[in-house]
Image (spheres, rainbow, N blue to C red):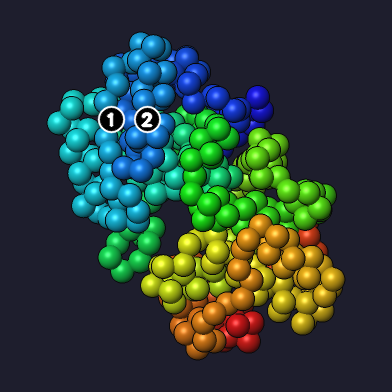
Amino acid sequence: MTRVHVAASGCYDIIIERGILSRVGAESAGLLRSEKAVIVSGERVFPLWGETLRASLESAGFEVLCYIHETGETAKSLESYGALLNFLSEKQVHRTDCLFALGGGVTGDLTGFAAATYQRGMPFIQIPTTLLAMVDSSVGGKTAVNLPSAKNQVGCFYQPRAVFCDPEVLKTLPQEEYRCGCAEVIKYGVLGDGDFFSMLSERDFRGDEEPVIARCVEMKRDIVEADEFDLGQRRLLNLGHTLGHAAEKCSGFALPHGDAVAMGLAAVMRQAAARGICSSADCERVIETLKKYGLPTELAFGKKELFEACRADKKIANGKMHLIVPEKPGACRIIAMDTEELRSWI
Ligand code: GLY
């Protein structure tokens, strides 16, 4: 078992252990004074892992309710968010009860925002079931739902009471989603730990995820503790995401997030190498590592299209944005630029 403690506006542990899912009830009981435990999960994940969680919560003495949302980004619509709140109200869930988000980033974002807002805030616990959610979205307290115009437009920072990562659940994760998690894992190596990156490039961590998840969440913990509200250092986590988000938009959101991040990371490495900010050898190492994990490294969209998509990024304020640029695996710099300068990077 690995336990990583986070001290942000809320303090909590991230517990990583194969098989921990069946002990979530016992581990959570001491953290809460809830009668009801509400499992929030998607249509694909609940049939796989929902009963294990339900049994664990029931044997710890909770009255368990289950709320199943549809799979995919539509679960983060305002309607879907409202439906979850109505369910909580109809079932007389109280603000001392607890929501358990069992799923990937969509489930975590929806559940976290419902927990943050229902009756002015109630506890929630993250149980990520994708590699991407384990290493990124379940940690750090970003919660949100979407507007028709753009993703994650309505949300808040709200920390969970605990995060339980069980690598066992990754065995039912579709290959495409596993690969997407690998892109975020490689991103961590490039942004903050050269030795970790070397390990990823020299070995193959697939099938032995616990130490890799632990290292990623330690890095994310350090960043979140330094900049919980995303005003400075937390921007580092956006490495590969500026062009990645643009590529997702250009594809009409058909491109999986991790594939888009891999493309964005490869593109920014190439530009950094062309400008002498990183070496061509380091650029090649990153691109080869992405390929080794089955990730795409070519941005298959036009420059104009990508630029327009970048300009619509919600992180642009007063025409200024921040691009995360690698100097070498393990070290990145944050470059503030206006959108015209960004055009030259594309
Ligand atoms: N997923 C990026 C962040 O948590 O800031």
Instruction: Tell me if residue 190 comes above or below residue 116 in the rendering.
Output: below
271 on left or right of 160: right
Residue placed at 62% from the left, 53% from the top? 182
Quarter of the picture holding the C terminus: bottom right
From this viewpoint, which residue is outermost toward the left? 90
Up the image or down, 294 lies above or below 45; here it is below
**Residue occupying image coordinates x 81% and y 67%:** 282
Q: Is residue 124 visible?
A: no
Find the distance from the CA under tag 1 to the CA under tag 2. Answer: 9 Å
Count residues near mark 2 (Cα–Cα under 10 Å), then give few for <14, some for 14-19, many for 20+. Answer: many
> Is 302 drawn above or below residue 194 in the view shown?
below
| Residue at mark 2 | 50
Asked whether the viewer can see residue 38, the reply is: yes
Residue 58 sits in quarter: top left
Q: Residue at x 59, y 61 (%)?
A: 238
* In this picture, residue 22 sits left or right of residue 224: left
* Amino acid type at mark 2: Gly
Task: Residue 261: name its quadrant.
Answer: bottom right
The residue under label 1 is 66
Residue at coordinates 38% horizontally, 39% vertically from top-left?
45
Q: Tell which circle, 1 or 2, labels the residue nearer the N-terminal end.
A: 2
Q: Nearer the viewer, mark 1 or mark 2?
A: 2
- Quadrant (top left/top right/bottom left/bottom right) for the N terminus: top right
Q: Residue 297 at x, y = what percent?
A: 64, 71
Residue 267, how many percent across, how many down? 65, 75
- 1 and 2 marks in contact (CB < 8 Å): yes
The amino acid beneath tag 1 is Cys
Helix, strand or loop at label 1? It is: strand
Residue 118 in percent (x, y) is at 27, 37
Q: Image height check: is 109 above or below 126?
A: below
Image coordinates for residue 72, horizontal then vertical, percent: 35, 53
